[in-house]
Image (tube, rainbow, N blue to C red):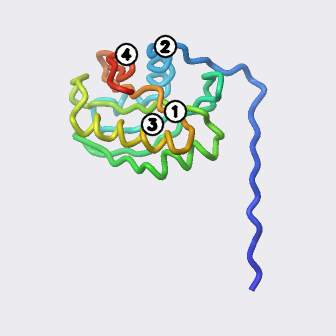
Amino acid sequence: MEIAEISVSYSTSKEEKLKVTKSKDSYDILISNWNKNTLELQEEFKILLLNRNNKVLGIYPISRGGTAGTVVDVKLVFSVALKCNASSIIICHNHPSGNLNPSESDKVMTEKLRKAGGYLDIALLDHIIITKYGFFSFADEGLIR
């Protein structure tokens, strides 16, 4: 039985990449890539992938759920980060309710992703919650160790 060899490749565009230096940069990038028509309809979870210089490699939509939650698969988050050769990630989800406060499950999931990233040397820099009224940054509030 012949088994196919796995090949790995990586390339990036020559376009100037956006750099993230503060939570507002992350928010601006993420909100500009969000469907404003579904911001208050259903919860979505996305990751912002960054290189070692905090320049944006891309955004990946992880999941889309209902009005009160969405499922986040840790394996999927880090498989995408590894495939993109990301050095760090910023996670983001919206709260259709407009409430910017993180839930207990938001905090638990953030810590789970932080720990998993630590094993892979992929830093979780921030968790941004967005609504049509603004954003909440876990890093700004000292909620990421």
- What kind of element bears circle 4? loop
Earlier in the chain: of badge 4 and badge 2, it is 2
Task: Measuring from the top left, give residue 59's x and y in whole percent.
Answer: 54, 34
Q: CA distance from mark 4 to mark 2?
A: 9 Å
Which one is in front in this view, the residue at disc 4 or the one at disc 3? 4
* Residue 4 in the figure: left or right of residue 73: right
Q: Are marks 2 and 1 in contact (CB under 8 Å)?
A: no
The residue under label 1 is 123
Task: Measuring from the top left, give residue 90's x and y in whole percent.
Answer: 48, 30
The residue under label 3 is 46
Tell me the kind of residue under disc 1: Ala
Earlier in the chain: of badge 3 and badge 2, it is 2
Residue pictured at 42% horizontal, 30% vertical? 35
The residue under label 4 is 140
Question: How many other residues sit within 10 Å of disc 1, few (<14), some (14-19) or many (≥20)?
Answer: many
Residue pictured at 74% horizontal, 34% vertical? 12
| Residue nearest the viewer, comparing 69 with 96 | 69
Tell me the kind of residue under disc 2: Lys
Earlier in the chain: of badge 4 and badge 1, it is 1
Q: CA distance from mark 2 to mark 1?
A: 15 Å
| Residue nearest the viewer, comparing 18 with 50 | 50
Q: Farthest residue to the bottom: give it.
A: 1
The residue under label 2 is 22
Which one is in front in this view, the residue at disc 3 or the one at disc 2? 2
Image vertical order of residue 26 relative to residue 87, above or below: above
